[in-house]
Image (cartoon, rainbow, N blue to C red):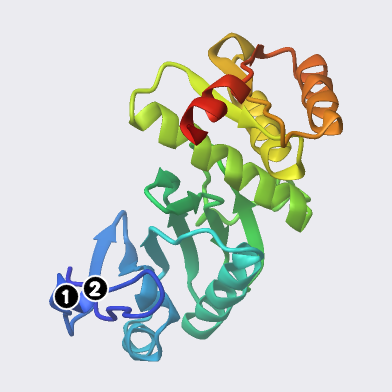
Amino acid sequence: YFKQTLPNYGVFDENRYFESGDKEFIFTHKGLKIALLICEDAWSISPNKLLKKKLVDGIVVINASPYEIEKSDIRIKVISKLAKETKSTVIYLNAIGGQDELIFDGGSFIINKEAKLLHQLPFFKEETAIIDVFSKTSTKNNIPKAPYSKEAHLYEALKLALKDYVIKNNFKNIFIGLSGGIDSALVLAIANDTFDKKNITAVMMPSEFTAKLSITESRKMIKNTGVNYKEIDIQSIFKLFRK
């Protein structure tokens, strides 16, 4: 199957690497007609018109859809419309993980032909589930859709981004420069919630320009998190550079 709709906006530049197709892909499994779409195809009018004519039982959409704030709600809205228009159950599969500047948040889900959410997997973690979506006895009793706030969702995205950046680059330890301010405090909090404390070292490097409050606040962070801490006075080094 060749993806029919190649996005070229934001982080996408698919026309540069791929050639689009113009035919749908439908296969039969145990008497059920299943169509395959790739990401942007599900958001496009053209492939959906083709699927209407084929009267498929189900649609599988494979995706590497990057994380954005409230993007999951938009996905469900778009796929619900697709399910309703095609009168098909839609299985939406999304990648998970941090890759360079992109974060893929997972949250795969199933929308039934009545455009209702049947099942959803967690965000920001790999998980599998066996769901009988075509059985007449299927129920909607267990939908593990986490009640994330925007802030909690964003924080989990930052944790996943840091985790995969460190692991995929094979870093063994993390060193974080503290300033006593909010920016470094947030980075330390994310690291502390993601990795073992023994692998995190926070460093404070005071000089004549460092306020006492900055040092005090940095020491409070260390007390609260329990990570390794080094305080290195760089005033003497600064004086050498001035000479």
At x 56%, y 51%, the residue is 107
Image disc number at residue 229: none
Q: Of 164 and 230, which appears nearest the observer?
A: 230
- The residue that disc 2 covers is 14
Q: Does residue 73 appear left or right of residue 84 in this picture?
A: right
- The kind of residue on which mark 1 rests is Arg
Query: In terms of image quadrants, where is residue 58?
Result: bottom left
Q: Note whether residue 76 is visible.
A: yes
Q: Which residue is mark 1?
A: 16
Q: Is residue 161 left or right of residue 14?
A: right
Residue for point 24% across, 73% down:
14
> Looking at the image, which residue sits at the far front?
243
49 shown above or below 136:
below
| Residue 19 position in % (x across, y down) | 13, 77
Which residue is rendered at x = 44% and y = 80% of the image? 43
Query: In the image shown, does 162 or 146 lie closer to the viewer?
Result: 162
**x then y, percent, for residue 159:** 59, 38
Q: Amino acid at mark 2?
A: Glu
The reply to whether callout 1 and callout 2 are in contact (CB within 8 Å) is yes
Q: Secondary structure at mark 2?
A: helix
Q: What distance separates the C-alpha of mark 1 from that of mark 2?
A: 5 Å
